[in-house]
Image (cartoon, rainbow, N blue to C red):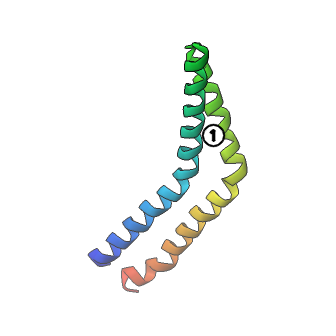
Amino acid sequence: MTSQNAIDIGQDALVLATKLAAPFLIVVLAVGVIVGILQSVTQVQEQTLAFVPKLIAAAVVIAVSGAWMLEEAVAFGQELMAQAPEMLGR
């Protein structure tokens, strides 16, 4: 295994982590902004009103894109396992 292989694996892992985290982050950010605007307009500053919609949105993201996320993670793992003998020099 060369240092370039390790760098490539690390880079691929970071790209995968970004792809898997992006749906959560984007949806929760959007819900947080909307709830924040609604709270400032109605002047209701209850903390649970900000938390519960974000939790529901995260659950919806898992329900909608969970299969795709799992497929991506499994494909990455399978690719690493397929490359292992080559990197070990066998």
Quadrant where the N terminus sits is bottom left
Residue at the farthest left position: 3
Q: Nearer the viewer, residue 15 or 70?
A: 15
> Residue 61, image x and y in percent?
66, 46
> Residue 10, image x and y in percent?
37, 65
Q: Residue at x 52, y 51 (%)?
A: 21
Using the image, determine if residue 83 lies above or below residue 66: below
Q: Which residue is mark 1?
A: 58
Q: Residue at x 53, y 67 (%)?
A: 77
Q: Amino acid at mark 1?
A: Ala
Q: Nearer the viewer, residue 23 or 35?
A: 35
Q: Residue at x 41, y 86 (%)?
A: 90
Q: Quadrant of residue 15?
A: bottom left
> Residue 52, image x and y in percent?
64, 26
The residue carrying pointer 1 sits among few (fewer than 14), some (14 to 19) or many (20 or more) residues within 10 Å by Cα, namely some
Using the image, determine if residue 36 lies above or below residue 13: above
Residue at the farthest front position: 41
Label 1 residue SS: helix
Q: Nearer the viewer, residue 59 or 84?
A: 59
Q: How many marks?
A: 1
Q: Residue at x 69, y 57 (%)?
A: 67
